[in-house]
Amino acid sequence: MRVIFNEELKAVADDLDRMAQDVRKAINGAGDALLNQNLEAAQAVIDGDIEIDALESSVIDQCVKLLAKQNPVATDLRVVVSTLRLAATFERMGDLARHIADPASPLPADAQPLFAEMQAFLDNVADQVVSMLTDRDTKTAEQIILNDDKLDALHKKTFELAQSEDWKGTNQQLIDVVLIGRFMERLGDHAVSAARRVMFIVSGFDPSKEPTRDEGTDID
């Protein structure tokens, strides 16, 4: 029975890895679409979101079967439940990337540098999420959590830009700047959520906003 459980859990982990890779691709494509008005990239993100949704459904179905058939306990239960939550997090990240890829109008020129900086941050975070998940790397998870303040600071600048007396964009561009900034900030938040979940899988504690405060503690 243990061999069967491990094989089924490996299949779930493989689907989750593919979700993370697809989310990275979606984030990269969304930035290309937003900053370069690349319509092909935008369509690829929209189409790719369908695959992310399908993978989430697959992960959920497999996890429910594991819970029903294998009755996992302790660490195994922690992994299965956390996998369900990670799948939901990645699905939301795919949705946010789709929203970023399809703004109502191009960003004004004076907003481009700020959003390019936010996108560069997210591209790096997307790489970290894939690496963290593949290797169950808690050090990378800590970095994702701790670095999120940088994205929050950039997000704050989007409001300052929108409220500036020097704003020259249209009303629609104003709405887009506020909404897209929020979508990008939420992507960072979901990456943090994924990092906390991976740390919980590995160590058994939720690091919250201080990833090292309970180092060595386990709740098995």
Image (cartoon, rainbow, N blue to C red):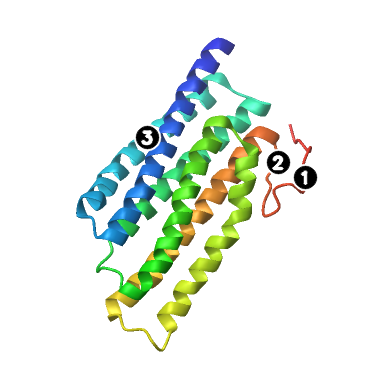
Answer whether residue 215 is visible to the viewer in this image.
yes
Rendered location of residue 68, percent (x, y)? 52, 24
Nearer to the camera, 159 or 31: 31
Which residue is the site of mark 3?
Answer: 55
| Mark 3 residue element | helix
Of the 4 image quadrants, the one containing the N terminus is top right
| Mark 2 residue element | loop
The CA distance from mark 3 to mark 2 is 27 Å
Residue type at numbered disc 2:
Phe
Rendered location of residue 219, percent (x, y)? 75, 36
Nearer to the camera, 50 or 27: 27
**Which numbered dot is residue 205?**
2
User: Which circle's residue, 1 or 2, is located before the other in the chain?
Assistant: 2
The structure residue drawn at horizontal position 36% and vertical position 75%, both measured from the top left corner, is: 110
The CA distance from mark 1 to mark 2 is 8 Å
Which residue is the site of mark 1?
Answer: 214
